[in-house]
Image (cartoon, rainbow, N blue to C red):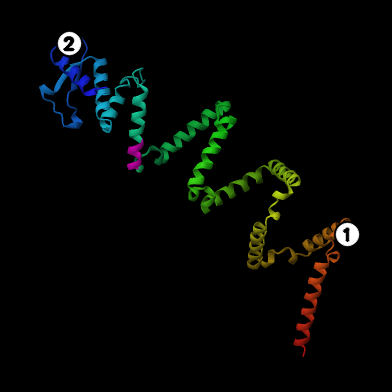
Amino acid sequence: MNYQKHYDTLMNRAKNRLLEGYSERHHIIPRCMGGTNRKDNLVALTAEEHYVAHQLLVKMYPDNDKLIYAAKMMTISGSDNIRNNKLYGWLKLKFSASMKEYHKNNPEKHPMHNPEVRAKISASKKEYHKNNPEKHPMNNSEARAKVSVSIKEYHKNNPEKHPMKNPETIAKMSASLKEYHKNNPETRAKASASMKEFLKNNPEKHPSKNPETRAKISASKKEFYKNNPEKHPMNNPETRAKASASMKEYLKNNPEKHPMKNPETIAKMTASMKEHYRKKKLANG
């Protein structure tokens, strides 16, 4: 469509007539494009014509943000701020794209960078979902699935943005979970029982079955006890007694698991003892 031709036709018709009743003043060449307030740059249009004229200008100059904004504002009533039926889809999309580009180039101007605005939006959403729990996205299985897929895709393409890569976030989440479970022992018990049941039915998924995980846990514990020897279980007589009783009970019920039933273990212990006594003999001359 030749938008310029339609625009020129509308302007020429407006120049050669006298409107009766309500009319709106329009700049043939928009002020944002260098137009003036001179009589030869002004025409009187009906409200409908004025809106069409601004739509045509946006079509003719699609990269002019000021024209887009002006056209959008014409769809809002000045008295009660209610949008009327002239807000066409294409203009909404155009305005949205324009705002995204603006905030991309001026991130500090984005409303979500304003703590007060964020707090108001958050409070409003919480109040709404409190009164309409069935409307919460997380109560909709389809919405949950979409959100999950979207987040996974985002973190796949931006691994450095994953919350678990941020020490501060990890610390906050850890503190939050500890506080939650401290105040909700029943939930803690349920989570523990659920995990035990899962690992019972899926033993291969247990962290201890993963050599890398075992090595990390072992290294972490060694480092901790090295820096905190008083916290080591074996430095606590009561803990030692419990561990000893527990191990005796276990081996009593599972004699085949006793280290002395394993030739490899026996060989290692024998070699270790021999080395120990050899060094002791050398030390004593």
Circles 1 and 2 in contact, beta carbons < 8 Å: no
Magenta segment's dominant SS is helix
Vertical position of residue 211 compared to residue 18: above or below? below
Q: Earlier in the sequence, mark 1 or mark 2?
A: 2
Instruction: State the CA–CA distance, disc 1 to disc 2.
Output: 106 Å
Residue at 79%, 75% in the rendered image? 271
Q: Is residue 145 left or right of residue 22?
A: right
- Image quadrant containing the N terminus: top left
Magenta residues, as a range?
A: 100-106
Residue ID for mark 2: 19
Which x, y percent locates residue 197? 75, 43
Please name the amino acid that badge 1 sits on.
Pro
Residue at 80%, 79% in the rendered image? 274
Residue ID for mark 1: 255
- Image quadrant containing the C terminus: bottom right
Vertical position of residue 2 compared to residue 113: above or below? above
